[in-house]
Structure formats: C-alpha cells, structure tokens
Amino acid sequence: MSERNIQGNADSWVELTENDVTSLRVQNLSSYDLFVKRGTIAAPMTIDGSIRLKPYDIFFETISDLWPGGSGSRVWGYSETQIHASVSHE
C-alpha cells in the first residue's frame, strides 16, 4: 500500500492518489473540512458528490463502496482553506 502526506493550496483540487486505485485510507490532518471525490486524471469541476471529512476524520474503504456506480479510479481533495492529509491506497 502506497502512503504519503499531501498538502495543497486553498480553492484548488489536489490529486490524492498517484494513479488508479481500488481502495484508500484518507485522514484529514488539518483544522478545516476536506472534500474527497472520485474522478479521472482531470480535476473535478465541483464538490457535488464529494465526501466531507471534518478536521482529523479518517476513513478506509474501497472506491466502489464509497462511490457506487461512479467513474474514474483516482481520488481528489479540495478545501476552501488548505489541504493537509495522510493518504494510503492500493
């Protein structure tokens, strides 16, 4: 399982996975909400359909359980303030 810490700027999407994945663990390490969304190699356009992680929340799930019937095998993160997350994936 690949693991890394990710930081990103406010109001921009950051790819949380390095490639296509089947399952992941995401922990929000910041004091701000983090929106997590399934997608393709292109950044999402909206937060619609995202999972909201409150500060210090964590989840571990398969992509198909999190977003049944969705398309794409990459996962993106967005925050209105800043992104700081720990991510592991397969």
Image (cartoon, rainbow, N blue to C red):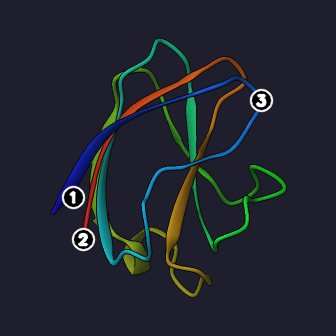
- The CA span between labels 1 and 2 is 7 Å
Residue at 47% over, 51% down:
16
- What percent of the width, then of the height, locates residue 2? 21, 58
Most extreme residue toward the front is 18
Residue nearest the viewer, comparing 50 with 11? 11
- What percent of the width, then of the height, locates residue 69? 57, 87
Residue denoted by label 2: 90
Look at label 1 and name its amino acid: Ser
Residue at 65% over, 30% down:
79
In this picture, residue 52 sits left or right of residue 13: left
Residue denoted by label 3: 11
Residue 39 location, quadrant: bottom right
Q: Disc 3 on helix, strand or loop?
A: loop
Q: Are marks 1 and 2 in contact (CB under 8 Å)?
A: yes
Sequence-first disc among 1 and 3 = 1
Look at label 3 and name its amino acid: Asp
Number of the label disc, if any, that sits on residue 2:
1
- What percent of the width, then of the height, locates residue 36? 55, 49
Q: Nearer the viewer, mark 1 or mark 2?
A: 1
- The CA span between labels 2 and 3 is 27 Å
Q: Are marks 1 and 3 in contact (CB under 8 Å)?
A: no
Quadrant of the frame with the C terminus: bottom left
Q: Disc 2 on helix, strand or loop?
A: loop
